[in-house]
Image (cartoon, helix red, strand yellow):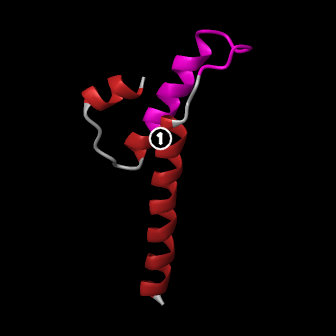
Amino acid sequence: MWKKIESMFGIKNALNRVFVFKNIVTLRYQDESSMGEHPNVFQGLINQIVSLYIPVVDEVLSLLL
């Protein structure tokens, strides 16, 4: 039973990682939003990546931004 539970959460964790990376790569500035909101959304996605224990180099973050 433990193996089944572990495999279910492992898949969910992998899907969460894909979802967060997809969101950060497709993030675009919205004209109707404030200029300060865009960096806040970006930082929120970076925080999600860090909480999922995904190592990201600063150079990659600057390229994404």
> Callout 1: helix, strand or loop?
helix
Q: Which residue is mark 1?
A: 48
| In this view, 47 is above or below 43 | below
Horizontally, is 37 left or right of 17 in the view?
A: right
Residue closest to the eye, 13 or 22? 22
| In this view, 14 is above or below 52 | below
| In this view, 34 is above or below 43 | above
Horizontally, is 35 left or right of 4 in the view?
A: right
- Residues drawn in magenta: 29-47
Residue at left 29%, top 38%?
56
Residue at left 34%, top 49%?
53
Amino acid of disc 1: Gln
Residue at left 46%, top 44%?
21
| In this view, 21 is above or below 33 | below
Confirm whether the magenta stretch covers residue 34: yes
Confirm whether the magenta stretch covers residue 55: no
